[in-house]
Image (tube, rainbow, N blue to C red):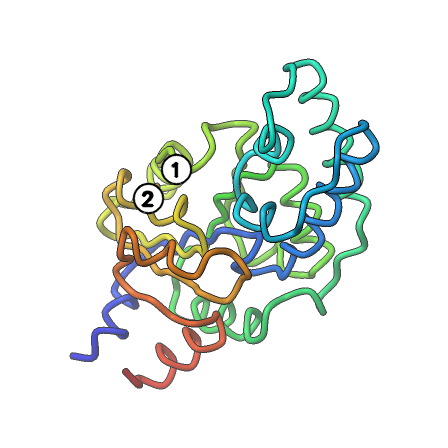
Amino acid sequence: MNKNLDVLEKKLFIFDLDGTLVDSPYWIVLYANITRLAFGFNGLVPCELEKLVGSPPKAFWNLSHPVPEKISNAMTMDFRRRLINHPFDARDLYESVAELLDYLKSQRKRLSIATNKPTVNAKHVLMQCGIQDYFSEIVGSDSFDAKPSPAMLSHLCQSAKVDSREAVMIGDRQEDIEASHWAGMSSIGIGQSFGPKDSLNIITPSWHFDSISSMFKSISSGRG
């Protein structure tokens, strides 16, 4: 059997958000630098911040030297305010995202989101992009420990009454693949965002695709 079709045996598909479904990393880096400048810190070259997309925002502030917690919390609030006010829409979805979600729903798969964003911010972006209704549950790091902790993934399995072996995590970052490992589930690495391209190879996901588009084409057509 085609290995890429084995993933269709899974019942629960858990997606990361930024860099996986929504092409938001550029804006995350931009607003992180704007926040740093607003609080009197030097701006950093984008390639330094790109590595941290998907991590809790405090990583952006502590990169050059530790920032006091009170200031770090204020910077995080400022950053999230800027980001939630950004006008995302369906044009910010990666190619074939809607087609992939439609296909998985047609196969009677349950879809969920596990993101290191706060839940309300994630729901807002999904709503702006017009895909919120595809997902049975959306959880963020305000309710559970951030990935690579498996807490979000374990909760989603329990909520869906699905064994972790019947679930798969889809993400573009090492944290996504590591979280799936600790949760006891399979993983799909997506290599389309501008993060470090070798990070997904460190842990070796169960499947790897260059993009959401190539994932959709492969599993929907049966090509290897």
Residue 88, image quadrant: bottom right
Q: Which residue is mark 1?
A: 148
* Tag 2: amino acid: Glu
Q: Residue furthest left?
A: 1
Looking at marks 2 and 1 on the same chain, the residue that comes earlier in the sequence is marked by 1
Real-space Cα distance between discs 2 and 1? 6 Å
Please report the residue visible at 28 percent of the width from the left and 66 percent of the height from the top: 7
The quarter in which the C terminus is drawn is bottom left
* Tag 1: amino acid: Pro
Is 112 left or right of 25, judged from the image as shown? left
Please report the residue visible at 26 percent of the width from the left and 57 percent of the height from the top: 204
- Establish if 68 lies above or below 51: above
The quarter in which the N terminus is drawn is bottom left
- Establish if 150 lies above or below 197: above
Residue 192 in the image: state x and y as whole percent. 50, 67
- Establish if 175 lies above or below 201: above
Q: Which residue is mark 2?
A: 178
Residue 79 in the image: state x and y as whole percent. 74, 36
Please report the residue visible at 25 percent of the width from the left and 52 percent of the height from the top: 166
Question: Could you classify mark 1 by the number of other residues whose Cα lies within 10 Å: few (under 14), some (14-19), or many (20 or more)?
Answer: many
Depth check: 40 or 53 in front?
Answer: 40
